[in-house]
Image (spheres, rainbow, N blue to C red):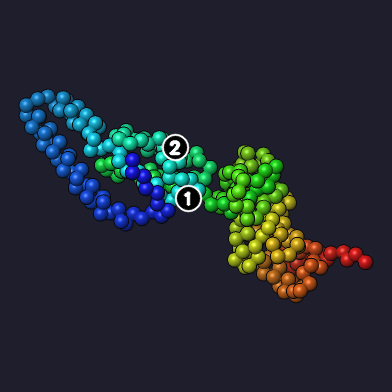
Amino acid sequence: MHLKVYRRDNRKKDEGRWRRTFLRASGVLGVVLLGLVAYRVSGPVTIAVISLREFILDSPYFSVREIQVRGADKVSGQEVVAMAGLRRGMSIWSIDLAAIEKKIGRHPWVRRVFVRREFPRRVIIDVEERTPKAIVAMRKLYYVDSDGVVFKEVGPGENVKFPLLTGLRPEQITAPDPATRKRIQDALRLSEMMVQRSHSLSEIHFAKPDRLVVYTTAYPIALHMGWGHWTEKLTRMERLLALWKGNEERLASLDMSFRDQVVARLRRIEK
């Protein structure tokens, strides 16, 4: 079986193949229809229809010869084909597209999958994988994506250079509700905003339903962000940090939860 794995969906190049395939299939079907017309004159229509159906379903012309897997990176093309249950020589008509999409969609790295036939003998599987945005830290570590979905335990040797999400309870992860997912999405949005402003995060702590405390990789300062109005709060935070430039280690925490002000708490200096 000819298996091709694509990192990108290059559909424009396939337009010419589609035209050629359509012309070939049209020729075959034209011959079949001519035979049907001839048989209509000399025999029962029901027998002719059955013969036509058997010809199409059993014809080697429609047996699978090539499978293209596109967009797969974390999941190998061979693994995708194995999950799909596709095999050499099977009739392209016998493929249950919805069932294959369901099978592949169970893989933790797969966010979305679309399977289609390309007549006469090619199957294309488009895979959209999940992209980790943070790691939920509980008894174990789990990846979470931009949709707020906790989708996979972090395995040995896998990338752990993501912000840690702490303060979530196990039941919020095992049986997530839309509200929890929305809170995670909002927290990740704050993380992206801070990265854009050159403040990469090491931890995002869910202190209360309406309280976020974040820690940057640059300073050991607890940044109490409250919830929402991130842009205004980040602007106030940056103004205060500018005043303390070079002495950031003296700051224990900054609280941006209050309107139009920042409350700074200093570290206790041991004498």
In contact (CB < 8 Å): disc 1 and disc 2: no
Q: Residue 94: x percent and y percent? A: 32, 33
Question: Which one is in front, 142 or 4?
Answer: 4
Mark 1 vs mark 2, CA separation in Å: 15 Å
> Residue under circle 2?
83
Q: Is residue 257 above or below residue 168?
A: below
In the picture, which quadrant includes the C terminus?
bottom right
Q: Secondary structure at mark 2?
A: helix
Q: Residue at x 57, y 51 (%)?
A: 132
Identity of the amino acid at label 2?
Answer: Met
Q: Which residue is mark 1?
A: 73
Q: Is residue 9 toward the left or the right of residue 108 in the image?
A: left
- Residue 164 position in % (x across, y down): 67, 52
The N terminus appears in which quarter of the rendering? Answer: top left
For badge 1, the amino acid type reads Asp
| Image position of 197 with respect to 127: above or below | below
